[in-house]
């Protein structure tokens, strides 16, 4: 039965314009599980790319966690092949996780797809997160007590070392995407994990439905997350400006920090600036625990920082002698890699040996 509200090619073009720009003749990788959301994304992206002289490569990850996963991956490939869409099945290797199954699967999935895209020279990886996914992510992070960063939920575009991770469907509902597939006469696979009570996402879906019944629908929750994202971007701009005033990174891999400039800045911007410096020097992907960061920050801006500290893989030294600058260097540890006199190696990401 035809739907009154499928995603049209014009609708999808507007969604893609919001997450651009894209090169001429774009080659897009699309994560496709065979479910309704990802199948709709793949078919819409294929039409969009073909209209611009480009192509789509669909990537299906077989985790091997369920007996039927290989059959489902092959079925997805047949569906896409019948439409002339390039399809690749990526198989996860290694032992199956005993706990944190969904988290481990998600990490493995992105690792495999990003690696494929990097090797293939594909710049964009599209994933089919919807407005309901955004609402669920917001509630999950609210439950965990997240701040602005976490409550921003998922960004429409995120840069990774290999590709741009692109989510063009954050404003579309699951129902609308399934309506789109019905118009296209395309089947899809229902993931049994979506009904598995062992997983947090299953309970969150129920919570989202309950809230929608009280007028707080997924669109409103996603709008709150979007507002948090704008607030986070404004804060990040302030942090970048502050770093330009208070911090100097030396080629040898350490930083000079003016604590008096940090002390004059807005507290949250000052705290985030310190976290970013520590992450840069310590080469950490995530900031230290908030309470530890706040303690160090309090010593610095309070003028009571008088002895060396360590945090986030860094050694933080107070001003000494005639210098009024704090020094942040990498904490002394054993070499993480073996030296080979016949090869060049990168030293903590700052210099070559």
Image (cartoon, rainbow, N blue to C red):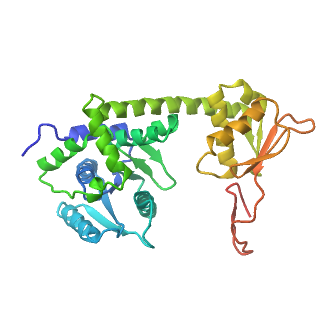
* Extreme-right residue of the structure: 321
Which of the 4 quarters of the picture holds residue 226? top left
Q: Is residue 156 visible?
A: no
* Extreme-front residue of the structure: 197
Q: Which x, y percent locates residue 303?
A: 81, 30
Above or below: residue 264 compared with residue 178:
above
- Quarter the C terminus occupies: bottom right
Question: Residue sitting at 30 percent across and 44 percent down?
Answer: 205
Count the numbered circles shown. 0
Side of 261 where 206 appears, left or right: left
Q: Is residue 219 visible?
A: yes
Q: Which x, y percent locates residue 263?
A: 73, 27
172 or 50, which is in the foreground?
A: 172
Side of 305 where 132 appears, left or right: left
Side of 264 where 225 appears, left or right: left
223 or 12, which is in the foreground?
A: 223
Q: Which x, y percent locates residue 55?
A: 29, 56
* Extreme-left residue of the structure: 1
Question: Residue sitting at 68 percent across and 45 percent down?
Answer: 278
Q: Which x, y percent locates residue 316?
A: 78, 45
Question: Residue sitting at 41 percent across and 38 percent down?
Answer: 138
Question: Residue sitting at 33 percent across and 40 percent down?
Answer: 170
Which of the 4 quarters of the picture holds residue 290? top right
Above or below: residue 208 compared with residue 193:
above
177 or 307, which is in the foreground?
A: 307
């Amino acid at each position: 039965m035809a739907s009154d509200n499928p995603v049209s090619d014009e609708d999808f073009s507007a969604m893609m314009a919001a997450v651009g720009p894209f090169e001429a003749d774009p080659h897009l990788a699309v994560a496709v599980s065979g479910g309704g959301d990802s199948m709709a994304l793949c078919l819409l992206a294929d039409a969009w790319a073909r209209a611009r002289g480009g192509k789509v490569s669909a990537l299906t990850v077989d985790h091997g966690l369920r007996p039927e996963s290989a059959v489902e991956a092959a079925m997805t490939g047949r569906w896409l092949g019948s439409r002339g869409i390039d399809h690749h099945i990526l198989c996860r290797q290694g032992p199956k996780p005993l706990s944190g199954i969904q988290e481990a699967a998600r990490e493995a999935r992105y690792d495999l797809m990003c690696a494929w895209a990097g090797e293939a020279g594909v710049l964009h990886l599209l994933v089919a997160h919807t407005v309901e996914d955004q609402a669920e992510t917001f509630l999950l992070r609210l439950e965990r007590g997240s701040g602005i960063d976490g409550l921003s939920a998922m960004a429409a575009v995120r840069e990774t070392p290999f590709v741009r991770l692109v989510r063009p469907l954050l404003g579309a509902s699951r129902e609308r995407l399934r309506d789109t597939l019905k118009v296209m006469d395309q089947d899809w696979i229902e993931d049994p994990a979506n009904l598995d009570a062992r997983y947090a996402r299953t309970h969150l879906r129920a919570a989202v439905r309950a809230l929608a019944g009280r007028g707080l629908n997924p669109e409103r929750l996603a709008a709150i997350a979007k507002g948090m994202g704008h607030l986070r971007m404004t804060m990040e701009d302030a942090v970048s400006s502050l770093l330009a005033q208070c911090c100097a990174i030396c080629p040898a891999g350490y930083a000079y920090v003016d604590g008096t400039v940090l002390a004059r800045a807005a507290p949250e911007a000052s705290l985030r600036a310190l976290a970013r410096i520590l992450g840069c020097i310590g080469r950490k992907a995530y900031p230290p625990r908030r309470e530890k960061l706040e303690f160090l920050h309090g010593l610095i801006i309070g003028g009571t920082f008088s002895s060396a500290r360590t945090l986030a893989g860094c050694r933080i030294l107070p001003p000494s002698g005639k210098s009024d600058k704090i020094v942040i260097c990498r904490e002394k540890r054993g070499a993480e890699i073996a030296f080979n006199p016949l090869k060049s190696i990168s030293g903590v990401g700052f210099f070559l040996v």
